[in-house]
Image (cartoon, rainbow, N blue to C red):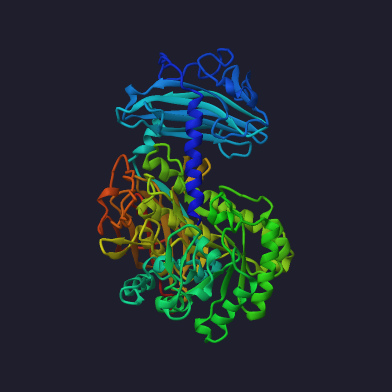
Amino acid sequence: MAYTQSMNRTLAAAACAIGLAGIALIGLSQSPADSNLIRNPGFEQRGDPPEGWWADPANASKGSIELGPSPFGQGKLALVLRPTPANTDASKPLGVGQAIGATPYRGKRLYYGGTLRASGEATAVLGVFVMAKSGSMLGGGTLMRTEHSPGSERLEDTVLVPDTDEVAQIIMVCAVNGTSGSASFDNVALSAELPARLKASLADPGAPLHATVEVDAGKIVRTIPRTLYGINTEWVWNGNGIWDERKARLDPDLIRLTRELGVSLIRFPGGTFSDYYHWRDGLGDQDKRPWQSGLPGERKSRHVLGTEEMLAFARRAGGHLMITVNVGTGTAEEAADWVRYVNGRRDRADRVTWWEIGNEVYMNDGSPATAQIAMTPEQYAEKCAAFIRAMRRADASIKIGAISNESYWNTTHRDWDRKVLGKVGRDIDFVAVHNAYAPMVINDGGRGVREVYRATLAAPVHIRKSLAALRGRIGALPPADARRIKIAVTEWGTLYHALPTSRFVDHCKTLGSALYTASVLMAFLECPSVDAANYFKLVDQLFIGAIGVRGDRFAPTASYCALQMFTRRFGARLVKSATASPTFDAPALGYVPATSGAPYVEAVASLSADGRKLTIMAVNKHFDRSADLRIRTRAFRPARGGAVWTLTGSGLDANTGTAPKQVPGIAWAKQAEDEINPRFSRGGPNEVTVTRMPLRNVSSPMTYRLPAHSLVCIEMNAAPTSAGRRP
């Protein structure tokens, strides 16, 4: 993952917010008689601009501000913004705004919302920004719609006003991004009174939910590839601790933790670093290896973790390498020589089967790291074809993957997959995709933990659709190619932010993130085309590893525990199951679109290789309420006893107490905490737990209660048949 992309987007989002606020710095409007703080919220009072709203005269060339018949059936009129080709500055777009004095609302959470529609290339933007006396932004949020956005046209969310003397104004903005089309707005609202449904989403310790799962053990969906349980590593900075430079050895604690995690496919040399990595620099006497930057402009580190060290690490940890070759700054022959080096002189136990050609070279965020290696689809397809030819000559039996640009949040080249697959589809074994990160709240806008986590836990809905879309493009190839080509999600996981200044950057380690991890794994399991997946990443002494640092020792995070539940407890064969569950909605937030109908409870089921054990893995995403899961099995008669493994914790933001490394010159922001049950700052070994309990009186049907915010593994043993044998 290129962190420089996230940094640039952070700056862009902040600039956009400040620019939007600039159109509304006017005298304070008076609070209306009702709870809505906005004057003329339905745009029924005419004017140029509409009564109560203000528009920047400098934006006159950027488009027209009109009042037209409401397309929403909510009053007679609606605001319509029609941008022109001059509306290119996203920090100062065409729009209207108004301001409210913020002092009475210090420390309070405000509701905001509106009905939005967009046409053509336009994006309708409804923003709320809390401004300081100095003119800087203290918090806020945005709601956006395009012509193709899913879900209701009514969008709503909440924003927290900081409790500080610095707050001055709260500014609401209706704006349009884009240079053509139109954006319509009606019934906008800003209120100190939260609707009952939003209050319920902040704290809802009510009666248990009711969900059902039907399991047909007689219908095998597929044998589960162990390569779904992969992980990412990086060569830089001693592999984030994999190599203990003081003792000149692989770290035994990390070997043990990785082996206990049960991962299979270990990706190396790591993300964007791969496209600057020259493998020969990591050979020979470690003291003589060069010091180099992982990316242009970054600090240097020595190549102590090279090919031989990583092969040894994978072997001792019980896995195999997946190698990403350097397509950005390397050559086809360099990649082919790497294949020869690894596979040409070793027994099959140490071979590398999976080879990926490049990382995210479709991306260019303007940073030196991405600008130097960015390619068009035509350029990548040509290079990829040359790499494939050279690597096949070195070893015809390897699996080779080309990268895909598919994602649910952004596609930089809409025709990337068509052109790449059209060129190399007949020659590859898999496509590598990074479409399962969430929520990437580059500008959190003062949102609370529950709002952010609600969007995070809804994201798997979009990930499933993204995988289906990619499968559809593969399916359009000639039948032999479509059957052969699989999907490898070579990076995935929770990612909130990349900068230490973010209030959410360290939330990858929480129980809420572990529930996301479980939900995404279920999506991979249920998509038969997904043949491999690599969680990002194994270990990090900053904020994103499955293994972090607690004190001076490596320690598992909550997501480690979720991954381990699948690698150690889930069976060998996926069986057919169908789950019915209450659902929740989530507003657009970060890179996650607005979501309708995301299930609170998800479940998948498996059989052991010998058919004697049925395992049901179920996740309850509700923050506060348990869920009664009604279980019915077919083609499997359970014995009376079994076992239940439960991963849960003291709260949604509970964590095992790992913490980012303190580096001189870097100040880590105070992290946001759950508004109802704050546990983040209390992290420790007992905050997140995995427990085993006997399961008694097993039958079909039966009901098992899933705790709030939990991942539960239910293991059933098969009852003996009348002949004394198990089925």
Q: Position of residue 567 (x, y in %)?
A: 42, 68
Q: Position of residue 96 (x, y in %)?
A: 54, 23
* Image vertical order of residue 507 relative to residue 541, above or below: above
Q: Nearer the viewer, residue 525 or 15?
A: 15
- Could you tell me which residue is drawn at 63 percent across and 27 percent down? 62
Q: Please identify the residue farthest to the right as the structure is shown.
A: 478
Q: Is residue 550 left or right of residue 349?
A: left
Q: Position of residue 644 (x, y in %)?
A: 34, 63
Q: Is residue 138 left or right of residue 90?
A: left
- Could you tell me which residue is drawn at 35 percent across and 39 percent down? 204
* Residue 214 in sight from this viewpoint: no
Q: Is residue 261 left or right of residue 360?
A: left
Location of residue 647 by image quarter: bottom left
Location of residue 396 by image quarter: bottom right
Q: Is residue 679 left or right of residue 99?
A: left
Q: Nearer the viewer, residue 591 or 559?
A: 591
Number of on-image labels:
0
* Residue 311 in sight from this viewpoint: yes
* Image vertical order of residue 508 relative to residue 358, above or below: above
Q: Position of residue 400 (x, y in %)?
A: 62, 71
Location of residue 353 by image quarter: bottom right
Q: Nearer the viewer, residue 578 or 15?
A: 15
